Image (tube, grey):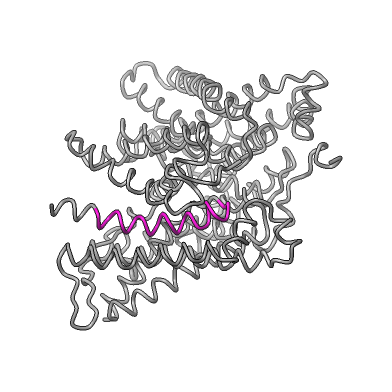
Amino acid sequence: MPYLITLLNLLLIYLMLSVSTNLVLGYGGFFVFVQAGIFGIGAYASAVLTTKFSFGVPPALGMAILCGALAGLGLSLVSLRVNKDYVVLASIALQQVLTTVFYAAEGITGGPYGITGIPLPSFGPLGIDTPLKFLGYHFSLTGLGLFLAWRWMGSPYGLAVKGLREDEVLTATSGIDTGTVKLKLFALSGGMAGLAGAMYAHYITYIDPTSFTLMESVFIVSTVLLGGAGTLWGSIIGTAILVGLPELLKFLKISSSALFFIRQIFLSLLILLILYFRPQGLKGEYAPA
Amino acid sequence: MVPILVLALIEAGYIGLIALCLNLLYLLTRSFYLALGAWFSVGGYLFFYIVSREPELGILFPLLGATGVTGALALLLEILIFEPFYRKRSGELVLLMVSLMVYTLLTNLLALKFGTDLKFLNLSSEMNLPFSLTWPQGLRLLVSYLLMGLFIFFSVRSQVGLKIRAIGEDQELAQVIGINVVRLRRGAVVLSALISALLGSLFVLDLGIDPYGSFDILLLAITGMLLGGLQFPFGALMGSLAIVFLKHLFILIFPIVNAVIFSLLFLALIFRAEKFRLPQTGAERSA
């Protein structure tokens, strides 16, 4: 039972990340490989504020959301100027920059040694200090994130985002300011990824740059492509399968480092198969052309 | 100052060569062939493996063996993985994803087999050339610029180069007039993989190689390619040479110089977007 609760907690954190990616990729049609980097920004923002500056967790979560949103906004500036191929490249470049900074800025991030002793969340008298309380806490935050994503994408704004994906020129000619739509979309996505990072930091209580690399971004994109791009159910299904699968492999008594590489090999093959045979994923509505 | 210039010249050589290969493949596939970074690592690891196992073979035969096997593997994956997507007329975004997944697959296979620690032969002390140049550095310098010169000569002067530029202009029209696009593309992939594997093998002599290290080289080459312009071949070449010399100037000021270079790419995409509009193909112009 405790193992299952731990797995569920991780699943909820990664679900938040997957939804944040799905907003940009599935609804907006932009392939981005920077979610792990923005996840890291949120994690480090919250960790640094709580460990070095004695911030409480609630304001630290707020700062994590803000930092993530700003990073997303930065990427959106590229999307305003060039086509989607270059947004992919820009996102990869930004991911590499962030990974390099996480390793190099030892005074802030602890470099390769990371940050330890990150406090558990507490909201006044309510301390989140047991796996079950964490489950309730993560369920609430991820549930809120899912609800907001569902409302946004079901609103006229969401229609504009889908219009952007299908035909940006036609969307623009119908009077929609596509620039503002993109800016908001990337900021929302970045904010959610930043929040997921803060959730992760206060759950694991230790972070280092290895959790926020390009390969993690590939994993996050895989959850969207497998489950289905353009629907929230897609993120739920994809995350459940891909977070659960390595846990099954653990029963095969493979070392944890080999497990990481096997996971990446499996993911890359899976994405290739999905892109060829079922580009819309298991339950998606958008198939990359 | 002189050692910095020499190092910059060496790095500019192999980055420029990678950029030329990327540019060539871009013309033929209209997408960025990120898998090239994997061939760099595969070639390097194969070379290291052969030399470690059979040191009596020397350097040349393992070099030829490693590059040959890598070229063959590249052709195999081109036929098995990429060509189905070309036949499906997949878009540039999907091809970019496919390329990234091939890169991920190969580098993680290497990491699973060999681990992630740096592998190198440490042969740099065996011979010294003037200007404090070790012989692996001299070899990289010589091989890079020789291959670059040959590459440019054949691109500009040969019939094959003309056909490649024709495909870049309008692939369908090129097919109609009888150019075998599939054969040329396969040839370009094999040639690029051979060059990439050769460079990766030369790295093993002194600098070392790890599964993921080639990605930064690839991004540098792409940055140079984009900044120099996608016109084949001089745009990519000039851009990558410029970016490497800039990097070596920055090294003196910024410790995390790769982050600075990639930030330049990011800023260039925001502020100089008009340079990255691809030259329209003939089909796009007449549409």
Q: Horizontal and vertical percent for residue B37?
A: 50, 37
Q: Residue at x 58, y 37 (%)?
A: B95
Q: Nearer the viewer, residue B243 or B178?
A: B178
User: Residue placed farthest to the bottom in the image?
Assistant: A124
Q: Give the left or right position of residue A198, taking residue A81 as reference.
A: left
Return the residue nearer the eye: B146 or B70.
Answer: B70
Q: Quadrant of the N terminus of chain B?
A: bottom right
Q: Please check the rendered image and state whether residue A16 is part of the magenta-colored stretch, yes or no.
A: yes
Task: Give the image quarter of residue B114.
Answer: top left
Looking at the image, is B76 positioned above or below residue A28? above
Q: Is residue A85 left or right of residue A272?
A: right
Q: Is residue A30 visible?
A: yes
> What secondary structure prevails in the magenta region?
helix
**Left-right relation of A181 to B139:** right
**Residue B199 locus on image (x, y percent):** 51, 33
Give the position of the C terminus of chain B as an image quadrant. Answer: top right
Q: Is residue B59 above or below residue B260?
A: above
User: Number of numbered discs present?
Assistant: 0
Kindly tell me whether residue B135 is visible in this rendering: no
- In the image, B31 versus A148, the foreground residue is A148
Residue that appears at 62% across and 37% down: B22
Outermost residue to the left: A1
Residue A65 x/y as whole percent? 41, 71
Q: Residue A99 placed where, x, y %?
A: 41, 57
What are the residue bounds of the magenta stretch?
Answer: A8-30
